[in-house]
Image: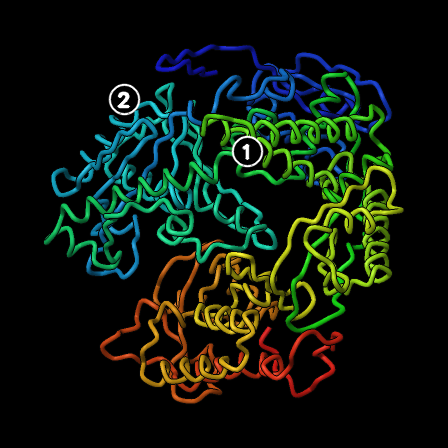
Amino acid sequence: MWRRDGERLAVDVVPFTPFLLLADPALVTAAAGLRDVQPLAGAGELRWLARFGSWSEALGARDACRTKTGIAPDLPAAPYRFFPDPVQQYLLTSGLTSFGGMRFGDVRRMALDIEVMTGESGEFPSAAREADRIVAVALADSTGFRHVVRGDRLDERALLEETTRILRERDPDAIEGHNVFRFDLEYLEARARRHGVRLTWGRDGSELRSRPARLSVAERTIGYRRYEIAGRHVIDTWMLAQLHDIGARDLPSFGLKDIARHFGVVAADRTYVDASNVARELAESPDRLMAYALDDAVETLGVGAILARPYFAQAQLLPFDYQSTVLRGSAAKVDTLLIREYLAAGRAIPTPRPVQSVGGGLTAIWQQGVGGPVLHVDVTSLYPSLMVSQRVAPASDDLGVFLERLDHLRALRVRAKGLARTAAEPEERAHQQALAQTFKILINSFYGYLAFTNGHFNDFVAADRVTAEGRRIVGSIVDRLGALGAVPIEGDTDGVYFLAPPDHAPAEDTALLEKIAAGLPDGIALELDGRHPAMFSYKMKTYALLDARGRVHLKGSGFRSRGLEPFQRRLIEEVVRLLLEGKRGDVRAVIDRWLAAFAAHQVPVRHFARTETLGDTLDAYRERVQAGLRPPSAAYELLIAAGRAGQPGDQVAYYVIGRSANVTVLEYSRLAIEWNAEGPDENVAYYQGKVMEIWERFRRFTEQEGLLPYRDESEDSTQLSLF
């Protein structure tokens, strides 16, 4: 274990005895290295804890259990449980967590960015190609250190050795990079192997270790190689951005430059270089290329300072190391919190219950069009509040830990929010805000945990009870609004947008809230969390809000879907803004402007290229297409034709060529990097058709004034299906 105290670093060696949880101790009676088998009290199926002398012996026992039972250790039905992360095992049984007494600013963070040159024989970077090489490694740390290991002054072998020397000398606690798992570290490791260089980045002198891994982000699964560096944490800001965007859905893309601009961490004199021109820049303007690489590293450090703080706070609370708090799901974090409490009490752990159906939250739309001013009332932490007030908890939680932890986290969040408001120092305020955000994430994960397939204490009946009660409560709020003369517009899981009763004044908001809340169960609190001059209610869970500062907030996948080309999202935002501002007569002029821009080839490729994220490897894609399990995809076919490697999580940008609006995209598409501004070949008719689809979708709102009762678009056969 490494401990930082200012500039001083200390290392301790502590005893560690890995373990397995078992339903039957006979599964390991003949296992090598077995220290002891302890009984655990309680009704849980996993009522035996077997300890082993070494990690390799514990792995052998796990494999023996798999052989005897025929069930893999990660399946819910397995009569044994093995946690494959030794750090998690140690923290589970020791009760320790990371970063005790530290603030985020105490962590020495180093950002890393590499620039590579592609040989003449290849269009895309490939570490396996001899002609390709690393031409710069930019390093920037949180103490102000800035340096570029330059490939114009060192050969690649010396560059790798110098990078290792500097990293060990600067001794960071965390290494950050943008897409560092899926590009930088893989590339560095492959080139080091080619030159016989050992990347001894571990604090104990060990080399990088890696293994295949997958990260679930909403409905997508991203494949990557997970790197481990002894005594250090690897944090990927590209993954942090993916996780941030699940809830916020406000990032223009997942590219570093766009994210840095979004969060306002771009230097005023930032250097930009076309990534396809690295070789030319190296030959003609090497200083400019090195400045570009360093700016990338500095921006990565800035993005990490914003997005990584909640995960640092989680590492102070959970039995995971810092790196794992980013890479593990919220439900898994709740699971390990409960397991830690049970192991500390010497209690048996239940096995996950079989999956059952669970009803969802209330979603409804009653009015469509533009109206205002609009208020939003919601139940503060609806599901957690219901679970606490009505004592809804897993049936298998004999110790009552679930609600105890939930209560504790809610109290901690209230305290952190209060301290954030009163903090005098920016660092303390940021620390408390990160804590409050972390507690909020974990609190909201407790409901999802009830329906978590692999949760040891899951309870689908309890989850269904929570959603049913949630629907009832939000439904009662809607009824109450109607009785008070308000006009409900849209409802979601825990709140309702509505027009206030006639003659209602903002000064009366508190009194109105009290009237709406009348009759709600104890423990259920309402808040008015928004007042907007105008709202555009478009369809279920898709709407837009105009705030008091004139900003437009688009909500819902219909407006923000990454399946839309960028120009469609920009056009939708322009149209929606005009509708919200009462300028519906100006919408057609915007449509005509975009039609003319496409006709004149004035739209840059980045605005009309479609970007898709791969969900399969190329081999898996081919197999699924051949088996008839999925249709062919332009993104995959273009990669295959270009001879480019691809893996789950990679993004591919392409555009449509040809002359007819009715072309088949699969046959008439090219990679975006092939587009040439001097000879543009995008399909003008096709993209103008996309513009007209948006006009047809919004035209009736340019002819409608105010709100009207919602009409289901699926009943109107003349409507196009853009969304």
Marks 2 and 1, how far apart at CA: 33 Å
Quarter of the figure with residue 352: top right
Tell me if mark 1 has few (under 14), some (14-19) or many (20+) residues whose alpha carbon lies within 10 angstroms of its own. Answer: many
**Is residue 356 something that shows in the picture?**
no
Q: Look at label 2 and name its amino acid.
A: Glu
Q: Position of 692 compared to 398: left or right?
A: left
Which residue is the site of mark 1?
433
> Where is residue 269 drawn, in percent x and y?
23, 48
In x, y percent, where is residue 439?
A: 63, 33
Q: Nearer the viewer, residue 176 or 75?
A: 176
In-image side of 70 versus 620 (left or right): right
Q: Position of residue 494 (x, y in %)?
A: 74, 51
* Residue underneath mark 2: 169
Q: Is residue 124 above or below residue 452?
A: below
Q: Is residue 396 above or below residue 689?
A: above
- Residue 576's spot in the image, x, y percent? 54, 71
Q: Residue at x 47, y 10 (%)?
A: 12
- In this rendered view, identify the residue nearer to me: 441 or 620: 441
